[in-house]
């Protein structure tokens, strides 16, 4: 698989919801986006602009009203193979201990107990969680540890693509910076294609190869971030890129 390989394509995608208060709510309208193999794409935009809907469509958890969503060239009509999903809440199962949570995807796929425990332990190490954590329930862990656990669960089946919906939004800023660094380490090792939704422009510029700015179901900017890694948040280049994305982000609100 080369860097030119398309992993995900949104082709003229629209999504309309019907609510009791409003007959039609358009989350996406004729939306186009292509993510290539190994690319880390961040999507930023205000609440309600369609960011989470985008991920749900890619994950096969919802179907478009119009257009098509393709993952590795195949039309998405249900949850596709090879995708890991990490949400803001983590959606860990509270009655399962950490190791069992991480191994859940392998268990669903019918992998034997010994093999899935081995693989789950290996991925816990990759996200910097110690062996002592594996017997803990989610409520016994800090917010940062729960998000590492959610990332480990997504990584355990060795997906080709990660969909991440504001995974670090609920933790404090130092922890968020630390988790961003750990995510980049994981990504550098395996080069999964990552589609990452965030409200934070700084987070997007720190993580991404490209930043897609959305509003009202449309793309208003698609900005390549060509800064070297690791990125210095105080450098002139970083601040300049931050301002460029911020200006694009504010355009829809200018009269």
Image: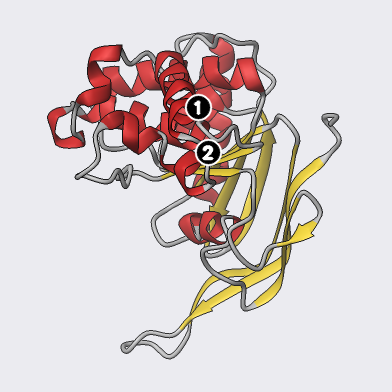
72 lies left or right of 183: right
* Screen quadrant of the N terminus: top right
Q: Where is residue 197 in the image (x, y as percent from the top left)?
A: 49, 44
Residue 125 in the image: above or below residue 18: above
Tag 1 near tag 2, CB within 8 Å = yes
Disc 1 on helix, strand or loop? helix
Taking the spot 54% from the left edge, 25% from the top edge, the residue there is: 207
- Give the residue drawn at x 36%, y 26%: 148
Q: In this view, does 230 lie to the left or right of 152?
A: right
CA distance separating discs 1 and 2: 7 Å
Q: In which quarter of the view is residue 195 placed?
A: top right
Q: Which of 58 and 28 is in front in this view?
A: 58
* Residue 164: x %, y % from top left: 48, 41
Of 4 and 202, nearer the camera is 4
Which residue corresponds to the image point at 50% horizontal and 54% vertical from the top-left? Answer: 51
Instruction: Inspect this view and state whether residue 3 appears.
Output: yes
Which residue reaches farthest left? Answer: 140
Given residues 91 and 123, the one toward you in this image is: 123
In percent of the image, x 37 and y 84: which residue is there? 19
Q: In this view, does 219 lie to the left or right of 153?
A: right
- SS under mark 2: loop
Q: What number is the disc on residue 115?
A: 1
Q: Quadrant of residue 224?
A: top right
Q: Residues within 10 Å of mark 1 (few under 14, many from 20)?
A: few
Q: How busy is the neighbourhood of tag 2: few (under 14 within 10 Å), some, or many (20 plus)?
A: some
Compared with 180, 116 (above or below) is below
Q: Mark 2 points at which residue?
A: 111
Q: Position of residue 88 (x, y in %)?
A: 34, 44
Q: Return the x and y of residue 202 as percentages of the image width and height.
A: 45, 28
């Amino acid at each position: 698989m080369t860097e030119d390989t398309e992993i995900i394509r949104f082709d003229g995608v629209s999504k309309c919801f019907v609510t009791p208060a409003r007959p039609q709510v358009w989350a996406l309208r004729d939306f186009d986006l292509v993510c290539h193999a190994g690319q880390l794409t961040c999507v930023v935009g205000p609440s309600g602009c369609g960011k989470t809907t985008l991920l749900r469509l890619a994950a096969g958890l919802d179907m478009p009203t119009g257009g098509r969503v393709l993952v590795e060239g195949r039309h998405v009509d249900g949850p596709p193979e090879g995708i890991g999903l990490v949400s803001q809440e983590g959606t860990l199962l509270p009655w399962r201990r950490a190791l069992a949570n991480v191994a859940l995807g392998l268990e669903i796929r019918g992998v034997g107990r010994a093999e899935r425990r081995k693989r789950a332990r290996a991925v816990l190490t990759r996200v910097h969680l110690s062996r002592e954590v594996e017997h803990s329930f989610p409520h016994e862990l800090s917010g940062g540890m729960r998000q590492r656990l959610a990332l480990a669960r997504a990584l355990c089946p060795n997906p080709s693509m990660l969909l991440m919906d504001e995974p670090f939004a609920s933790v404090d800023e130092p922890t968020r910076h630390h988790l961003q660094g750990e995510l980049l380490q994981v990504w550098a090792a395996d080069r999964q294609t990552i589609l990452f939704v965030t409200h934070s422009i700084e987070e997007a510029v720190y993580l991404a190869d490209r930043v897609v700015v959305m509003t009202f179901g449309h793309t208003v900017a698609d900005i390549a971030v060509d800064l070297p890694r690791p990125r210095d948040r105080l450098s002139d280049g970083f601040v300049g890129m931050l301002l460029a994305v911020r200006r694009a982000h504010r355009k829809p609100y200018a009269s």
